Image: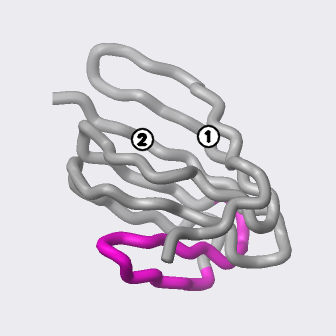
């Protein structure tokens, strides 16, 4: 079941060049990115302690994230991300152009 969105997450483009695109994402509690698919491999760096959920292929995974934690994902996976906690969630997303 898709996430219920109370408010959309806010994306702020920080910089972009021929090699990468860097975006800051800010989520109030309950906010979601909405369904999307990346055209590039990407890395995420968590900027705040929070509870994050993501949905892929109908499976929701919820986890506690900590400031400084990071992960890398491949392009082409349709997903939605949600702030599943009661505190603000912020992360930096780095999309790597080919």
Closest to the observer: 57 or 71?
Answer: 57
Report the predominant secondary structure element of the magenta stretch. strand
Q: CA distance from mark 2 to mark 1?
A: 9 Å
* Residue identified by numbered label 2: 94
* Residue 84 in the image, given as x and y percentages of width and height: 69, 76
Q: Is residue 54 magenta?
A: yes
Residue at horizontal 58%, vertical 61%?
46
Image location (x, y in percent) of residue 64 = 61, 83
Across and down, in percent, residue 62 comes to 54, 84
What is the count of numbered marks?
A: 2
- The circle on residue 76 is none
Identity of the residue drawn at 67% across and 78% down: 51
Residue 36 in magenta stretch: no
Q: Label 1: which residue?
A: 24
Chain part drawn in magenta: 47-64
Image side of residue 34 versus residue 51, left or right = left
């Amino acid at each position: 079941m898709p996430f219920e969105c109370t408010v959309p997450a806010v994306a702020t483009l920080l910089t972009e060049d021929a090699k990468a695109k860097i975006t800051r994402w800010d989520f109030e509690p309950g906010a979601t990115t909405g369904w999307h698919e990346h055209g590039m491999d990407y890395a995420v760096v968590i900027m705040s302690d929070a509870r994050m959920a993501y949905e892929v292929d109908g499976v929701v995974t919820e986890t506690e994230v900590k400031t400084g934690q990071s992960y890398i994902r491949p392009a082409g996976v349709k997903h939605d991300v949600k702030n599943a906690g009661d505190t603000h969630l912020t992360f930096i997303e780095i999309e790597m152009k080919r």
